[in-house]
Structure formats: structure tokens, C-alpha cells
Image (cartoon, rainbow, N blue to C red):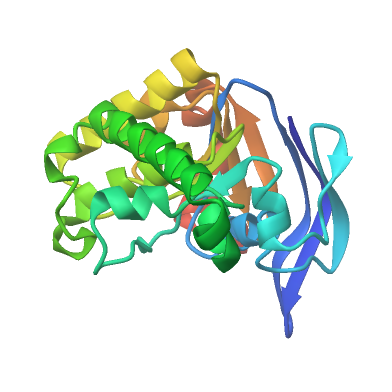
Amino acid sequence: MLEVKDLRKSFGGVHAVNHCSFTVKKGTITGLIGPNGAGKTTLFNIITGFYQPDGGKIFFEGERIDGLLPHQIFKRKICRTFQITREFPHMTLLENLMLVPGDQLGEKIWNTWFRQNSVKKQENKLRHKAQEILEFFELHHLKDEYAGNLSGGQKKLLELAKTLMADPQLVLLDEPGAGVNRTLMNRLVDNIKRLSLEKGITFLIVEHDMDLVMNLCNPIIVMSEGRKLSEGTPEEIRNDHRVLEAYLGGQYR
């Protein structure tokens, strides 16, 4: 589904992504791990159009997407979350979700005058969809709560719920487990597994919680110094001495 070829990105003299290549197969929950500074979040930012690469190519479903803007990549059904959640704090959970789909009729002011029935019909459809998604994530009882009042773990669930409003094919999750307590972490993991199994959504997940990665992801890609170091099953990654050296700083000796 996703193919990254010889991707490069530098900031001054720092090679954040350095001739990185890998693929993500459709229907998988692929983990992307590596020590701090390995280039994982920079890679996410390039794939989703927030940064433009210095070189290399990115293909999604066989079509080249490097060089596209974030909204153009979003329209190709690629969604992402961030390390720090980006909810609209003074809007309710329901409103946060209903805001996601693009090209809504009500965005054009003349439609609110001349196509009121169509606008209302679409809005009701989106409201129903948002309520179903909140029920899926067991957040429906908070639908009228301001998003800014949620706990850190609930905000992570809301982030994932928002991606579903766009009917994504590929979801990039940037540290979904960061700051989440164990109970909500288990819910998050269960939801990701269900979305992969029931809706066929493909996931690429950056995460530092090794328990989460080893129990959720297969395959796992390891980055170090801006490039792919290793790839394999959880068992293979666990027993790869190069991975251990990268996390302990052995590559600098």
C-alpha cells in the first residue's frame, strides 16, 4: 500500500531522514520504532505532506504522493494523529468529529440560503456517523462534553475517532500510547485491532512503549540515524543484536 524509496530530509547539517526505504503492506498493523532522534516523526511529517523531502519518492497505492500538500494527501484517505493531541478544546466531542469530513455543503454560504434541505440532510448524516463512531470508542456518554475537558487518554481515543470520520485507508499514529494509563491503553489497542480486522484499515504506528508494539504490531520496522536498520516479526526484532546496539548507543562506538 505504501512504498518509501530512498527518502532524504536534512535540517542544516542534520540528516533527519537519510536514504530511508521500506514498504507497508495493506491490512497490516506495522510498527515503526527506534531511539530518540532516529527520524520517525520527521518521516511521518514527510509522508503526510507537512515537510517536503530533499530527495526520494513515496508511493501510495501505486501513485506518487511526495510533493503533495497535506490536504491533498488527506483526500487520498491517508490520516494521521500527533504526539500532542490537536482537538478543538472549546467544541464538543460530537462537533470535533463532525468537523472532519471535507467538502461539506454548509461550507459555502449560499448553500445555507438556497439548499437548506440538502445542508440539513448532510449534517444529520454526519451527526449519525459521528455518534456511531463515539459509541465504537465508548465515548458516546461524553458527546456533549468540551474536548478540552477530557483526560490525556480520552483525547488519544478522540484523535483516533476523528480519523474514522474520513473513512481512511491508511492511518499513521504518532505515539498513541504516550501519557495514556494502562486501562485506556488496553482500550486503544483493542480498538486498533478491531479497526484493522473489521474495517480493513492499515496502520503505521510510531511508539516507544515496547509492550504495546510487541503485542500489537507485525511487522516491526526499526529506524536508526535516519534509515531503516531492521525489519521483522516481534520475535525477530527482539533477538536482533543491531536493534539492541542502536537503543544502547552501540552504533556510535
Q: Quadrant of the C terminus?
A: bottom right
Q: Residue at x 36, y 24 (%)?
A: 215
Q: Residue at x 45, y 37 (%)?
A: 164
Q: Residue at x 21, y 48 (%)?
A: 154
Q: Is residue 58 visible?
A: yes
Left or right: 26, with 200 as reference point: right
Residue lying at the far top of the rendered structure: 198
Left or right: 248, with 170 as reference point: left
Q: Quadrant of the N terminus?
A: top right
Q: Position of residue 167 (x, y in %)?
A: 54, 34
Instruction: State which quadrant residue 25 falls in.
Output: top right
Camera-nearest residue between 168 and 227: 168
Q: Position of residue 110 (x, y in %)?
A: 59, 65
From what the image shows, is residue 165 above or below residue 232? below
Camera-nearest residue between 105 and 142: 105
Q: Residue at x 70, y 51 (%)?
A: 73
Q: Is residue 250 visible?
A: no
Q: Position of residue 88 (x, y in %)?
A: 33, 65
Total labels drawn: 0
Instruction: State which quadrant residue 169 falls in.
Output: top right
From what the image shows, is residue 244 above or below residue 240? below
Residue lying at the far front of the rendered structure: 114
Camera-nearest residue between 229 and 28: 28
